[in-house]
Image (spheres, grey):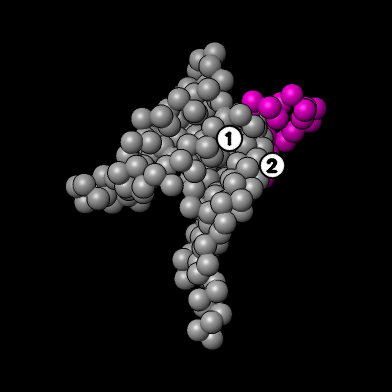
Amino acid sequence: MDKVFQSARISHSRVEDGLAIVLGTFVVSFGVLMLKKAGALTGSSAGIAFLISYVTSLSFSSVFFLINLPFYWLAVQRMGWEFTLKTFFAVGLVSLFTYIHPLFVHFTALNPFYATLFGNILIGFGFIVLFRHRASLGGINILALWLQDRIGLSAGKLQMAVDICILLISLLVVSTPMLVASILGAMMLNCIIAINHRPDRYIA
């Protein structure tokens, strides 16, 4: 039994990490594309990027990449260089893939409600892949963890406060039905993470 447990603690190789980050960000970015086409929203840094892209002429890809830049210093302080570099590449790949997907995929008929739910499911699955290879998509989550260490502010409460602000501001941008769909989609995404991202069930 001890040998089985010890073997489960063997870290992924760098090749495995690299492939996982590419595949995880590919899945996340396709989910983001579906949310974008549906006119929906999500939380955290991606939600902020959606809002900015909706009210300006800037693309989600460029905004998402740029708003994450200030958080990498915090990531180094809180998580170390390896996590920070993986996260930097993950954010860059999501930005790249969300730009590339529309060149090859065109939706002629897309139900906004369905697209919002399915898009969040894809994002949730992609997050699990990234988390299990010690990477993330940076942004508000890193800030929340840093503030928790520095001043004792609950990371979960700060994340929730930011998401609530995003949803309140979104009332000026999206319709009420789409806001409801976005909330349901975000709940589904968080359920996927809560069920599947547990250290006591998966050790990497």
Q: Is residue 131 among the parts visible in the rendering?
A: yes
Determine the image quadrant of residue 45.
Answer: top left
What secondary structure prevails in the magenta region?
helix
Residue extending farthest bottom: 1
Mark 2 or 1: the one toward you: 1
| Residue in front for this viewpoint, 193 or 146 | 146
Q: Position of residue 163 (x, y in %)?
A: 41, 40
Amino acid beneath label 2: Tyr
* Residue 184 is at least partly visible in this image: no
Residue in the foreground of this view, choosing between 21 and 46: 21
- Residue at horizontal 53 percent and vertical 16 percent from the top: 58
Q: Which residue is drawn at 74% across and 24% down?
A: 103
Rendering coords of residue 135 (x, y %): 49, 48
The residues bearing labels 2 and 1 have C-alpha atoms spaced at a distance of 22 Å
Disc 2 element: helix
The residue labelled by disc 2 is 114
Tell me the kind of residue under disc 1.
Answer: Val
The segment highlighted magenta reads 98-121
